[in-house]
Image (tube, rainbow, N blue to C red):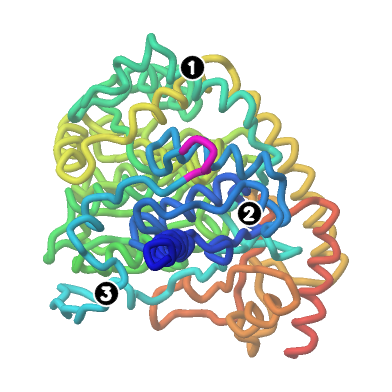
Amino acid sequence: MSCLCHSRHGALSKQLDRYMNDVPLVFFSIDRDSHRGLQKQIQIKVVEGIHTGKLAADSKMPSTRSLANFLDISRITVSLAYAELAAAGHLVSKDRSGYYVAAQPANIALGINGDAQVAQFEPRFTQQYSALKNKLNRPANWRKYPYCFIYGQADHSMIDHHRWRQCSLEALGRRDFDVLTLDTYESDDPLLLQELMRINLPQRGIQASEDQILITMGALNALWLCAQLFLGPDDTAVIENPCYPTLRNMLTSHQCKVTAVDVDEQGLPLEHIPDNTSVVFATPSHHCPTNISMPAARRKALIEKAKRDRFIIVEDDYEIENQLRNAPKPALKALDSDGHVVYVGSFSKSLFPGLRMGYMVASPTIIAQARALRSVVLRNPPNHTQRTVAYFQSLGFYDRQLRRMARANRERHEIMRRAIEAHGLEFASSPELGGSSFWMKTHPHIDTKILTAKLAEMGVLIDAGAPFFAPGSQAQNYYRLAYSSIKPEKIDHGISLIRKAIDELA
């Protein structure tokens, strides 16, 4: 009898231990507003639990039926998630018993506690980059705002997802994949370089060879390379005022001398460029943020001044693809015969901002130095992305998308212009200059930072103007309205809410 009781007690103890080691249902949760699918969310939760030690080896997973009922989702979703986790080696399936957590990763096996709190070492930073001022503040969840007038975001419905995916898969094909998996060191994709020389650059009047082009991680990366190459502590950089805030912050952190020159109705006035200038950063095609275009005579004069005073011009060909009416003027680089201009282009507006792909064009000597500098920090942009862009262009999809975006932008530009005029808002520069935004101003006593915060509470996002201006010259009553991501049918009501908020502050 005693042996029988002992046997029952042992069996009960083992059953209890097994039960205590089961993964509880409450460990799981799903976010129905997440961009990730339900199946992926389950997989991520399990992998995270394994790596943090919250899921021990041999823990029994909830049955597919019980987890599906608990999360109120389809049982097949749970089954597929479990199957993927098992295929990846995170779970193991046992006959007639279900799924169990597999062996732990190395850090758990060594007894390292992922949740342990350790004292944080406080290093001495050369600069407090997180404290840089004059940044444009945009909420990460901008898509949830009904009326989004912030600049730089794309309407995903205008992106040719099907054909982009087709080109991406083509780049993953066996013919290309063997090449794309190689470390190409400092080299760029020859197919993308050919497409730039065939399509993009000739449209701007630029003729270039492969040794004059460098692929970058967006225009900002190209601007950073230029700052590193040409500017030391004793050098002077000239920027426009107002200008792209991130460029000013970049140069400020670089610890060179920065001179901000107020733009006029023709862009950067040459007479205010100091004699000892090393580099001039300019947006002659579409000035940021006013959209002013520098006339041909001033462009030629700027080139002549650069030759005479021996400085470099970094030409950011900002938003050239959003020329709405007139044919764009040739780039400064097209007028440059002596190598004084470094041309910077980007696919952010013509394809989509998250691509982070740009390029710079300069003399072979400059490109050789830029390529060597780039290799120190990132070798080269991802081969697969470069090849996908090359296919997207060579198959004609790039030109097709540009035409579709141009039609949509013309429509939205006209709707927004009429709405702004109808609701009595004030333009700060001509509404006919092109680009995908309007530069605006309001009553002199209204701080648009306060206006921006007030509008956000009403579901409206705008860009306050102060960050575009140099310290000490910040005009508080300017703001920018962009239309690249807002649906046309929402524009008028969004503008009416801006009018209402301004009236309340006035």
Residue type at the position of mark 2: Leu
Q: Position of residue 418 (x, y in %)?
A: 84, 57
The residue identified by callout 2 is: 67
Looking at the picture, does residue 245 appear above or below residue 500?
above
Label 1 SS: helix
Q: Crowding at label 2, few (<14), some or many (≥20) Cα neighbours within 10 Å?
A: many
Residue 189 is drawn in which quadrant? top left
The residue identified by callout 3 is: 116
Viewer-closest of 379 and 174: 174
Label 2 SS: helix
Q: Which residue sits at x=71%, y=55%?
A: 69
Q: For residue 269, say whether it is visible.
A: no
Q: Crowding at label 1, few (<14), some or many (≥20) Cα neighbours within 10 Å?
A: some
For marks 1 and 2, the one nearer the N-term is: 2
Q: Please state the extent of the stretch shown in magenta in the rendering.
A: 94-99
For marks 1 and 3, the one nearer the N-term is: 3
Is the C terminus in the top left, top right, bottom left or bottom right quadrant? bottom right
Would residue 440 appear left or right of 199 to someone viewing this image? right
Residue type at the position of mark 1: Glu
The residue identified by callout 1 is: 170
For marks 2 and 3, the one nearer the N-term is: 2
Residue 430 is drawn in which quadrant? bottom right
Q: Is residue 98 magenta?
A: yes
Residue 280 is drawn in which quadrant? bottom left
* Separation (CA) of disc 1 from disc 2: 38 Å
Label 3 SS: loop
Is the N terminus in the top left, top right, bottom left or bottom right quadrant? bottom left
Q: Position of residue 467 (x, y in %)?
A: 47, 73
Q: Position of residue 147 (x, y in %)?
A: 74, 64
User: In this view, which residue lies farthest toward the top?
Assistant: 175
